[in-house]
Amino acid sequence: MTEESPEAFQHVSRKSGLQIWTINNMKMVPVPDQAFGNFFEGDCYIVLYRSQGSSNSMDIHYWIGNSSSQDEQGAAAILVTQLDEFLGGSPVQHREVQAAESSKFRSYFRNGLIYKKGGVDSGFRHVESNVYKILRLLHIKGRKHVTATEVEVSWSSFNSGDVFLLDMGKVIVQWNGPQSNRSEKLKAMLLAQDVRDRERGGRAQIGVVEGGDEEDSPELMKIMRAVLGQRSGKLKEAEPDDTPDRHQQTANIRLYNVSDESGKLVVQEVAMQPLTQDLLHSTECYIVDQGGLSVLVWKGKEASIEERRSALGRAVGFIKAKNYSSSTNVEVMAEGGESAMFKHLFISWTEKGQTKGLGNVYTTGKIAKVEQVKFDVMELHARPELAAQQRMVDDASGQVQIWRIEDLELRELHPSSFGQFYGGDCYLVLYTYKRASKLQYILYMWQGRHATQDEITSCAYQAVAMDNKYSGVPVQVRVVMGKEPRHFLAIFKGKLIIFEGGTGRAGVTNPGPGARLFQVRGTHEMNTRATEVPARSSSLNTNDVFLLKTDHTIYLWYGKGCSGDEREMAKAVADVLSRQDKQVVMEGQEPAEFWVALGGKAPYACDKRLQKEETPHSPRLFECSNQTGRFRMTEVEDLTQEDLDQDDVMLLDTWEEIFLWIGRSANEYETKEACNSALEYLRTHPAGRDPDTPIISVKQGYEPLTFTGWFNAWDPQKWSSSYEEMKQNLGDVASISQITVVSDSLTHSTTLYYHYDITNTSLTFDYLSDVDLENLLGCSRSGFQRLPRWRQNDLKKKAGLF
C-alpha cells in the first residue's frame, strides 16, 4: 500500500450505506447521491456498501463499463485492493462487468441500473447544470433486476416485448410493448418515478402508453411522433431475455489452492464438492470455482501480504486460463468475512468458539446433543424475527385435526391417538390458530418412510382438496418422517411418538411381540419426540434417554450425558407408550435382561464430547423459474418484502426449512411445479443438503410469522397498490405540457419547446419559446435581459416563473 493512499481515500465515509466513485486520471472521484444507479459505459467505478446493524460488514465492488480503457480497469483493480487494506482487509471484494452484475450489486439499485453512453473523458458529467435539457430513449430489460440502456432515439430501437422510456427532461413517456408483462411495466414505472424524483427534483411529468392500444393515448402519441417521427412498418419482435443464469446451481464445484511459485501462477485442484471447511488453511489462498458461473477467492488470515494483495488479480488470471467469459463474477473475501453464498457451498460451516450439538434426531454412531433454548411465546407476535428464528408461529395451543390416508381417502382420527405416527402411513394434520382475531391454518403433510407411492400421492392430492376447501388460506408444510419441524413437535405437547414401521389402521396386525427401542429427545413439552430405532445395543447414545419396551416391562435407560429435564420428558412419553411397569436403568448399571432384550451387549456411542453445530446460515431468497424447461433461479440479495413480486414463485432458504412463497398472480404451471423446484434445489445444492428438509408453501397474503420474521418491518398492506393504481395516480394526461419539435436538418439536432399553462407552478424560464415568453411577460427575450435583476425577478414572480 502506497503512503499516499490515506489521502486518496479521504472521501471514504465510515457511515453505513452506499458510496460510489468514478475513476478519473487514476483517481477516485465521488459520484453525487442523485446520480447513484447511473453508469457511463466508458468508465470504471468503485462502489462501497457498509451494512447497517451490529455486523457492519462491508462490500467493495469495482464496475467495468463495456467501453472503458484497460488503463482505467487496471487503476480500478489497484484502488480496490488499496481501499480494502485501508478498511482493514475485512471487506468482500467483487468484480462487476456491465450487463452481468451480481445480484448483490443490483440489490443496491432497486429501481434499476441506467447505462449511459460516453464517459468522463468524453466530457460527460453525472450531474448536468440543466437537468431538463435531455432527450434520450431508455430500453428497459429485466423483471427482478432492471437495467435501462440508452439506445438510438428512433422507432427502430423499439420492439413488441419490452418497455421503453422516452425521456425529454420535463416529460417522461413510458411505452409498454404489447407483449410486456405487468411486472416489467411496474418496474419501468418505478424507474421513471425514481428519475423524476431523484434527478429532476420531482418536477417531471410521467405518461404511459400501452403499445397495444396506442389510440387510447392520443396526446402522448402526438408527443412521441413529434420526437420520433411517424412509425413505418411493424415493430420488431420481442427480444429474448438471454441473460446468463448466474445463480443456477451446478454439480461442478471445485476447490483450488493458488500459489505464485517462481513468479508463475500455480493452480492446484484440492477437492470437488461436497466441500468441507477443514480443507481451508489459514496460511493459504484458495479459489472456489462454481463451474464458471462465479469464481470465489478465500484469503487465509495468515497468508502473506503479497498473497492477499494479488488475490483479485489471480482470480482474473484464473478466468482467462479457464477460458471463462470475461464477465464472470468474482468475489474475494478474507477468512472470517465469508459471504453467505460462500458458506452455502460447504456441507457445514462453524464459527470459532461455537460448540452446540447436532440437530439430528437419530444418527448411528455419532454423539449428538441438542442445546434446547426456551423462549417466551408472548414475544412471538411482538417480535416476528424471533418467531422466524424459533420456527414458531404461536405457542402451539391451537386446534388440531388429523386424518390418515386409508384406501387413498381421508379417515379422521380420534384425539386419543394424536401424536402416534406410523412409518407405513401418511397423515394430514390441520392446525388452526388466531392471529389478530383472524383464523389462520397450517396444513402438515406427514409422509411415513415406508408408505407406498400411491399413499404419498394421495396425501398430496387430499392436501390440495383441503386447501381449496379453506379458500387457499392454509400454509402447506411437507414433513418427511424424522424431520419434523419445531412447531409440529410443539403441537403434541411432548407426546409425539414415531414408530419405524407398521400402521395405525384398525384391524391391521403390526410387527409381532418383541423388544422395541425408542430414542427420546427434548427438554420440555414444546420440543420432545420419541423415535423408534433398531432394537440393538449399538443404537444407544450416552447423551440421551432411551425407552426399551419388552413384553413385560418398559426400561427407561438414562445415558450419563442426559439432563434431568430430558428424564422427566421420557417418563411422560413412557406413560403414553404403555401402561406396563416402568424400570429405571442407569447407564453402566444395566441388568442382564436389558442386554438380552437388545440381542446382547455391543459397543455404542459413549463419548461425552460435544460436536460442533452448524452455524445458523443467513437466509437466501431466490426467484424460481422453469420457463426454459430446466430449473433456474435468480438470487435476490439483502432480501426485503419489496422483492416478493406477486407474479413470481419465490424460494426462501433458511437452511432448517425451505419456504415457497407463491405470488397472487404467479402462473399456474410454476405454482404446480413449486414443490418439485424446491426438491430440485435441495438435490442439486452444492453442500449436499438433506433432501428431507421441510418444505413450506406460503401464499401471498397468508404469510405466517415464521416467514415474515425473516423480513425487516413486514407490511401486510404492501401489495395494496397495483400497477394499474400507480398508473392512475400519475394524473391527467391532458396536463402534460405540449411540445413543439424543431429539427435542424443540417446538424440533425432536435430542439424541444415546452408550452405551459400559466397556472403551472413548475414552469422553467429557460424552456419557454420566444413567443411564449413575450406573451407571458409582455416583452421580448432580449428586452427582458436588459432589465435590472430586481425587475426581472418581479416579472417572473408575477408570471409564475422561476
Image (spheres, rainbow, N blue to C red):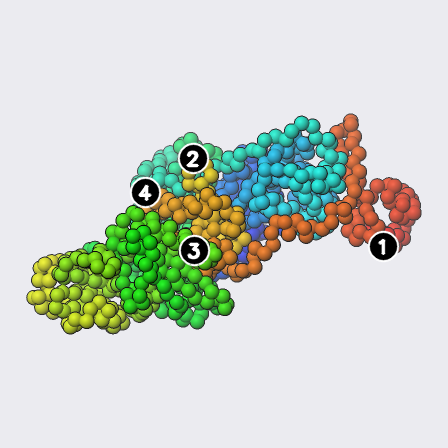
The CA span between labels 1 and 2 is 62 Å
Q: What secondary structure is marked by label 2?
A: helix
Q: Which mark's residue is nearer the viewer, 3 or 1?
A: 3
Name the mark on residue 273: 4
Q: What secondary structure is marked by label 4?
A: loop
Name the mark on residue 319: 2
- Front residue of 343 and 49: 343
The residue that label 1 is drawn on is 797
The CA span between labels 3 and 4 is 39 Å
The residue that label 3 is drawn on is 467
Categorize mark 1 by other alpha carbons within 10 Å: few (<14), some (14-19), many (20+): few
Amino acid at dot 1: Lys
Measured as percent of width and height from the top left, residue 552 is found at 12, 68
Categorize mark 4 by other alpha carbons within 10 Å: few (<14), some (14-19), many (20+): some
Q: What secondary structure is marked by label 1?
A: helix
Residue at the (48%, 58%) spot, across then down: 702
Q: What secondary structure is marked by label 3?
A: helix
Amino acid at dot 4: Gln
Q: Earlier in the sequence, mark 3 or mark 1?
A: 3
Amino acid at dot 2: Ile
Q: Which mark's residue is nearer the viewer, 2 or 3?
A: 3
